[in-house]
Amino acid sequence: MKKSIILTIAAAVLLTGCKDSFLDRKPDGATKYGDMRQDQYEQLSDQLEGSVRGLYVKLYSMGGGHDEFGKRSIDLWGDILCGDIALTNKNYGWLYIDETLRTVTNRNGTIWGFYYGMLHNINATIKAFQNGTDFVTKLEKHGFPSEITDEFKYTEAEYEQAVYYAQVLALRGYAYSNLARWFTPVTNSVYMTTEKGSYTIVDYPCCPIYTENNMDSPQPQSTSAKVYEQAFSDMTLAIRLYEEFGINYIRPNKLTIDREVICGLLAQAYLNEAVYRTGETLKNHLELALSNAKKVIDSNKYKMISEEDLLTNGFNSVNDPSWMWAKEVTIETSGGLKSWFGQVDIHSYSYAWAGDTKVIDRVLYDNMPEWDKRRLWFNDGTANKTYFLCPDKKFFSAQNPISTKDDDIDRDWLSDDVFMRFESMYLIAAEAEYRLAEIGAGDYSKALSYLQTITDQRINHDDAEAAGEYADDVAKWSDPSELKKQIIYNWRVEMWGEGYGLETFRRWDDTRSRGDNHDYKLPTIKASDDYFNMVPPSSESTYNPYMKDKDK
């Protein structure tokens, strides 16, 4: 690999702050590529690998307080915002803006800065990679290995470069799909109503698109459709690069995204975007969501959590065979209180243990059937009413899975973080098949089959009564209206606390009741409410003349 590659060193990537504006182009600690002496680069054995590795750190790095810790904190905000997670107390104040549905104007700058901070470093890495290697030029000239008709061959180093390039493109697609998801409003799915009237996804002004070619100057807002298209393009190319160059690649850890993770991200993005579409585009994007989810399922690389392991795995280890994408927490990377387990786990020294419990919404819990073993993920209050409905059997410390005594509490916070789980692929497939069947292009029975693959592992098979009740319920799911309810229900319960709650709520344009265990009493919420229509932060207008101050 060429030693002349000019890339931002890993440390520069790691230290990028969460600015309100992407256009603040010198994040704290960053060194602009090209300004560093060659001998400094020579100190890194592999600049490309080091730079790409540094990009991943952004996923779990964020400035601010103890409720800002990267991707998993954004997952938490969304799950609280949609009501799936109830914050029962406000002793310490963290996350209360989410509980009171003030996220739109209080988190929008942080979310905007988080993803655009990622994009700044990603685009710099892509630009430097293109300038410092011959791989991209050769790819444009000769094509992919399966297309080559002459005697040209890629080198072993270029096969390696292709895999790193795929990862960077996939991360850019991931960032843009999330910006589009957060900053595209929801009303009746296809038409989005704002104070200026109705829009479709094709003409709604969402956010600017920055690539390696235009990142040095402000860009106008692109439509939601174009932002999604950028995400689709990046992730589709990344998958192709993996399939052509990375067939023998073995990732070093689960934080590193591989082909299956990218397929999962792309499937999720297509599913979220498709609900805004009509006609042939709707059909096509649902089919792409389904086909990418099926690629993961058919890979046989992952295993669904079984009924036997449901209450014992603790969602705390990257070694779980259902975990597709995850962060291993070490002493060096632990955020302490500023982490998922520092906020949610009652078996760790956490805000939840100290009284600010994050629990399942009471209405959602009460609607869980008796046959559903996932009820046992949540504390029923029998042993300790203080922690009623806490997820103490879904998320618990690997070091201390049972006790809440002061002397036993986990003060190391070394439990791992899950980013993507295999079960989500079956839920994407089930929903895509359902929506295709709605428009006459799919099969409700296939949707049921994907869903039942999960629910068959969520009953106590030793309990004959529960098994009978489950069989009776499944028989009802052949009715499309009942099947729809079950797909939504399983998104909310199976993926509780994993960051899918808000997008599920918005995608189904849902209306739901909030339980009485929320500290902030608001009985009913609708996905079309202003609470859930995120707008670009007002500070962005200071840096970008194309942006209007929507936040005032």
Image (cartoon, helix red, strand yellow):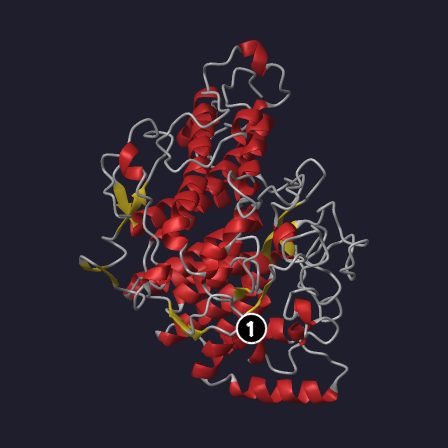
Q: Residue at x 60, y 82 (%)?
A: 369
In this rendering, position of residue 457 left or right of residue 59: right
In depth, the one of 339 and 506 nearer the eye is 339
- Mark 1: few, some, or many residues within 10 Å (few <14, many ≥20)? many
**Residue extending farthest right:** 407
Is residue 19 shown to the viewer in this render? Answer: yes
Secondary element at image label 1: helix
Residue 527 rendering spot, x and y as whole percentages: 37, 66
Q: Residue at x 72, y 38 (%)?
A: 331
Residue 295 rendering spot, x and y as whole percentages: 54, 57
Location of the N terminus (image quadrant):
top right
In this rendering, position of residue 343 left or right of residue 83: right
| Residue type at numbered disc 1 | Leu
Is residue 442 shown to the viewer in this render? Answer: no
Specify the quadrant of the image occupied by residue 393.
bottom right
Q: Mark 1 points at which residue?
A: 451
Residue 383 rendering spot, x and y as whole percentages: 75, 73
So how many labels did they put on this image? 1
Vertical placement of residue 7 versus 397, above or below: above
In depth, the one of 187 and 77 nearer the eye is 77
Residue 517 rendering spot, x and y as whole percentages: 54, 71
